[in-house]
Image (spheres, helix red, strand yellow):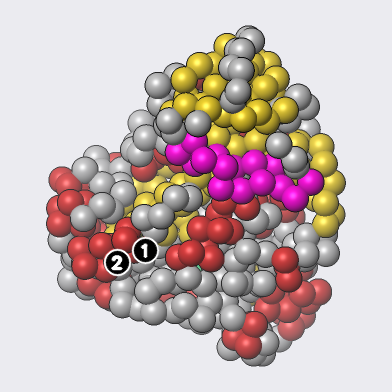
Amino acid sequence: MELLIRGGRVIDPAGGVDDVLDILVKDGRIARMEKTVDAPGAQMIQAAGLVVCPGLVDMHVHLRDPGLTHKETIPTGRAAAAAGGFSAVACMPNTKPTADSPEVLGYILDAAASPGPHVLPIGALTVGERGEALTDAAALRQAGAVALSDDGMPVQSAAVMRRGLQAAGAAGLPVLSHCEDGELVRNYAVNEGAVSRALGLPGRPAIAEELMVARDAMLAQETGCPVHICHVSTAKSVEIVRRFKALGVPVTCETCPQYFSLTEDEVPRQGTLARVNPPLRTKADVEGILQGLQDGAIDAIATDHAPHAQAEKALPLPEAPSGMVGLETALGVTLTYLYHTGALSLPQIVKKLTAAPAAILRVPYGRLAVGGPAHITLFDAEEAWTVEPERFYSMGRNTPFGGMTLRGKVKYTIVDGQIVYRDEKERL
Ligand code: DOR
């Protein structure tokens, strides 16, 4: 079966392509990518006016499966990924049991083996994410792990982190670090600042994140092992990463759409829907994040898709779990706040959602190459739509973007040459 994607604006930052081209897909691969391709009998997608780019890569999601399937399952998470334009998602190990063994990774890979977005498991850095004994990095890599992380339960001990980096480095795996000092943040719900004071709640201070960003960047410098900082949320975190990069240290970082679009002011308005770790910060932090996205201090955009059940998010703010879903709003929020504001160009944005995260994880995604796998996303950069959480494919409805009108919509997601998502307005 052949599929012809006709006349779209093909943006492939890894290959240096930004041109109106036809793409012919055959047997799951890109067969041709040229000005004009004739393929009589091929299924055709009219892509004029659309952007055609490599399938998006989300290096940070929580699929909750095994064990927390009242929040999300691997099938529902993959359906949400497809609807969001993602052909590959890397899933964090804070499942039940923790993804700290080849057996749990095997379960995840088996559950995600059907056609659709690929699931790339991230193994835990420490057993049970308890921050003490290290997992077997080589065995986890052998079982399919693309990275190691204790996301959600940051490794508090510098000694454990240092040994973990060395072990992961020796096994050829990057470490992804959620940076927050546990004693400084406890289980507090919001950023420490004007909003926490107004609400009379203890807050999570920016320094709790920045101290650990600095610690892990220094450990990367000392060990030579790559560290990737998850979801940076403060201007100073960006500045620390920028400085260590300038020294040639192997440190990279991501941010998430909520950190360049929202501030702590969302908490009084939206309550637990705006509760996330690290917390939404200040306007000055949003500006620092934008600067980092522009100058390259921030490499990638990830979602930290963190579904929770409605009853859990209905708890009072100090008790509700942290996290927000993001797969189905990521592209719309990113285009609305980065492209339509003039902050970043489409090729810059596409790179941060494709080639950059793929390079950090060293996985073969995020590129359109003749002969390579046909993981392709088509989107309309202009189309306005309103976020309706009740229509999400994800089981999670916990988004602060509900009801918001965004500009930029996923039209088709193609994985291994198969259309795995098509916007309801599109007809072949
Ligand atoms: O808000 C968050 N939720 N941050 C994390 O690091 C973990 C995540 C979750 O698993 O719910």
Quick check: is 135 in the magenta stretch? no
Q: Position of residue 331 (x, y in %)?
A: 67, 46
Identity of the residue drawn at 32% across and 58% down: 109
Q: Position of residue 357 (x, y in %)?
A: 46, 41
Query: What kind of residue is marked 1?
Result: Ala
Q: Which corner quadrant of the image does residue 134 belong to?
A: bottom left
Q: Dot 2, how many residues are within 10 Å of its Cα: few (below 14), some (14-19), or many (20+)?
A: few
Residue 278 drawn above or below residue 237: below
Q: Which corner quadrant of the image does residue 370 belong to?
A: top left
Tell me: 182 left or right of 408: left
Tell me: 341 left or right of 197: right
Q: Residue furthest front?
A: 41
Q: Position of residue 9 (x, y in %)?
A: 68, 22
Residue 178 drawn above or below residue 4: below
Quarter of the figure with the C terminus: top right
* Element type at mark 1: helix
Q: Residue furthest top?
A: 35
Residue under label 1: 111
* Element type at mark 2: helix
Question: 55 or 416, which is in the foreground?
Answer: 416
Numbered-mark total: 2
Q: Main secondary structure of the magenta part?
A: strand
Q: Which mark is residue 107?
A: 2
Identify the magenta region: 410-425
Q: Is the residue under label 1 in contact with that under label 2 (CB below 8 Å)?
A: yes
Q: Which mark is residue 334?
A: none
**Can residue 335 be seen in the rendering of this structure?**
no
Mark 1 Cβ inside 8 Å of ligand 1: no
Identity of the residue drawn at 31% across and 77% down: 97
Q: Position of residue 117 (x, y in %)?
A: 48, 49
Query: What kind of residue is marked 2?
Result: Tyr
